[in-house]
Image (cartoon, grey):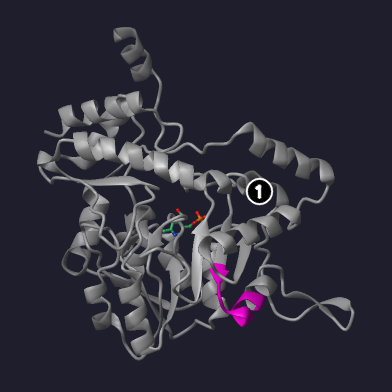
Amino acid sequence: MANKLNEMMSTFIPLAKPNILEQDIQLVNDVLRSGMLVQGKYVNELETSFTKLCQTAYASAVSNGTATLHLALIALGIGKDDEVIVPAFSYIATANVVELVGATPVFVDIDISTFNIDVLKIEQAITPKTKAIIPVHEFGLACDIEAVMKIAVKHNLAVIEDAACALGALYNGKHVGSFGQFGSFSLHPRKAISSGEGGVLITNNETLDKKIKLLRNHGTEIINGKMDFSEFGYNYRLTDFQAALVYSQMERLQASIDYKNKLAIIYNQQLNTSKMQLPHIPDYTTHTWQTYHVIINETINRNELIVTLREKNIGVNYGAQCMPYMQSFQQKYKLNCEALFPNALRAYKQGLALPIYDLLNKEQVNYIINTINKLVS
Ligand SMILES: Cc1ncc(COP(=O)(O)O)c(C=O)c1O
């Protein structure tokens, strides 16, 4: 027992680890041997499996989950002089894409119990310039998307759901990403399934889908029987070997979510909550546990805790950014985050993401819990 514990303590437990099986690698090999490397059979298969899972009419695979958001904004015609509402707490990509199209991100604080946008604060952020909302389903937990949709319909705003972390998450039984004009997913290695880099954009709108498929490929179209270019576009294509890598992972998605739920139950039951706030799951959703994220009391120095846990071979990190607090946004907008976004700032400064993934075993989870409980008490 002591030997096993020693061995565990000497092996680093990363924050995330994709579960790539031999069968996934085999599919990649098949593509490499075929010579058809970009946007081939597996890109089509991947798109079909997203439409089946999310129950939408269309899906487009692209190079990453930032390109998806960027293309969605362009396809909706959002640009200079427009405002887009985003939660103040997310991965920086959510706000960066708004800047990339020349629009202004308008930040709204989060609910500290779910880490998702505080829907009660959205309406006060709407101005005549507001064109869209990008709600984030943070850490794999659906935000209150029906409440967001009601506000969007009332004010005639588009909704791009940033579901980068939330593949498999349901809101009242319906897949996230299928409520708004667009739903955006990332296939980065920290996500539920991974192609290395990759992203998928889903929609029910045929015109928007056509636009996305043109924009991701330089506006390439067959016009009068020959290849031509009908729009200025991008190279946001996904390679076929990336699509092949992720394709068979789709079949294991639910089993992976179920396993992570089991690990989350152990965390929920055994982490000492005297100085730690554990994740809260509202009735309208189930958690897919892209991240198990806790808030550490201010009496404990979170940054020192991260260093100490890493020294003990536990790969923890902060979960996401208070985006308006980052240098790029501070220089441009100089927003007082303490006053305007106290919850987002708290989640950024006191949040702690713990390892949770298929390849993490229960002994490792117990070691993580025991180590944290000793340090956070
Ligand atoms: C909420 C959110 N949005 C967007 C992205 C961007 O995805 P990608 O890294 O695939 O570009 C991420 C990735 O971490 C994310 O967490």
> Residue 362: image x %, image y %?
34, 27
Q: Is mark 1 within 8 Å of ligand 1?
A: no
Check the image and report above or below for 273 versus 206.
above
Seen at 64% across and 61% down, the residue is 48
Q: Residues within 10 Å of mark 1 (few under 14, many from 20)?
A: many
Q: Nearer the viewer, residue 299 or 179?
A: 179
Seen at 16% across and 27% down, the residue is 374
> Which quadrant is the C terminus positioned in?
top left
Check the image and report above or below for 333 versus 41.
below
* Span of residues in magenta: 202-210
Judged left or right of residue 71, residue 143 is left
Residue sticking out furthest to the right: 225
Q: Residue 208's quadrant in the figure?
A: bottom right
Residue sticking out furthest to the front: 173
Q: Nearer the viewer, residue 124 or 337?
A: 124
Seen at 15% across and 36% down, the residue is 272
Check the image and report above or below for 10 versus 113.
above
Residue type at tag 1: Gln
Check the image and report above or below for 19 versus 105.
above
**Residue 304 colored magenta?**
no
Instruction: Name the secondary structure under disc 1.
Output: helix
Residue sticking out furthest to the bottom: 128
Q: Badge 1 is on which residue? A: 242
Q: Nearer the viewer, residue 93 or 19?
A: 19
Residue 119 in sight: yes
> Residue 204: image x %, image y %?
56, 75
> Which quadrant is the N terminus positioned in?
top left
> Residue 81: image x %, image y %?
44, 86
> Residue 44: image x %, image y %?
70, 59
Judged left or right of residue 181, residue 28 is right
